[in-house]
Image: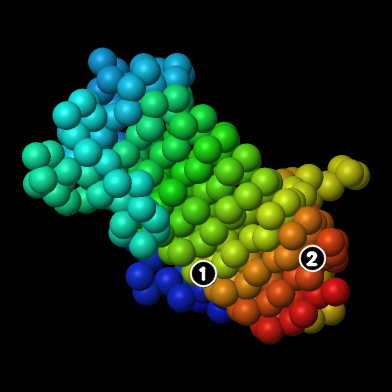
Amino acid sequence: MLSAESLFDLSSFSHSEIFTHGEHVWSGLNNLKAYMEKYSYLSLDRSLIPDGKPLPDTVILHNGKFISSEDLAIEFGDATKGSLKVTRNKEVLSGASVLMAGSVFLGDQIALGEGVLVETGAMIKSPAIIGDCCEVRQAAYLRGYCLAGKRCVLGHATEIKHSIFLNDAKAGHFAYLGDSILGTNANLGAGTKFANLKMVKGNVIIRHNGDRIDTGRRKFGAILGDESQTGCNSVTNPGTIFGKRCMLMPNTTSPAGYHPEKKLIR
């Protein structure tokens, strides 16, 4: 069966319960909305973070409280490597997250972990869950129901909706992900596009071992197993599933269906 356990190591993923044990891996997409609706979110300080408007000044989240960055020093190291550092009078504010001026937060269901960097020009629509040490880069567009584990990159000019990033998944540049899942250490080359809607009506069908499996989903992008990657300017058809450590070559369109572990798609 195309289960989450067959594609991902879920042992360190904080949201592993989103996948229904013993069911197909796209159960995570089916469960995403309900999971995020009942999640406990920290209240945003609207005196510092206006709803749906660019932040006028950089804001720091530390120990569950939003504070002004005035009189604080910020070292903009690689957040995914724990190198983002905020200090007050040489005292390190351990685990502080940085929300840069010009970023936009729309809605109240937004959770940010420790050591997160949200860059200028990023827009995060509710609901969103961003785990520890993630980077939400300049011009990233999170359209809602985006869930990211730890040390993920939600990249520059990348649009993401109704999708899941497991720990260390990265979509660094000019990508589109709709109704998709990236496994642990999965990486997208610049310009990767996950098409999620068929041009003809009907549910997305997955072909696997000679069977046609009706996913029950009208929208279904791609699911990449742990350590799979795509080359620059590659495209996946709706209903594409990669096993672990697959590789989609640059400028290539992947056929829909299941591609087994370690497959090279040319």
Q: The disc labelled 2 sits on which kind of residue? A: Pro
Instruction: Find the residue positioned furthest to the right.
Output: 200
Instruction: Find the residue positioned furthest to the bottom.
Output: 262
Compared with 192, 140 (above or below) is above
The number of callouts visible is 2
**Which residue is the site of mark 2?**
250
Residue 34 x, y percent position in the rendering: 46, 43
**Which residue is the site of mark 1?**
185
Compared with 210, 30 (above or below) is above
Name which residue lies at 31% across and 59% down.
82
Q: In this orientation, does residue 21 appear?
A: yes
Q: In this orientation, does residue 258 appear?
A: no
Residue 94 x, y percent position in the rendering: 17, 51
Category of crowding for the residue at label 2, using alpha-carbon neighbours closer than 10 angstroms: few (below 14), some (14–19), many (at least 20)? some
Task: Give the quarter of the image for residue 149.
Answer: bottom left
Task: Give the quarter of the image for residue 104.
Answer: top left
Taking 143 as reference, is 21 left or right? left
Q: Return the residue nearer the eye: 126 or 153.
A: 153
Task: Give the quarter of the image for residue 254.
Answer: bottom right
Image quadrant containing the N terminus: bottom right
Q: The disc labelled 1 sits on which kind of residue? A: Asn
Marks 2/1: CA–CA distance? 18 Å
Name which residue lies at 38% across and 32% down.
100
Name which residue lies at 67% across and 48% down.
175
Compared with 4, 111 (above or below) is above
Q: How is the image coloured?
A: rainbow
Q: Secondary structure at mark 2?
A: loop
Marks 2 and 1, the one that precedes in the sequence: 1
Q: Secondary structure at mark 1?
A: loop
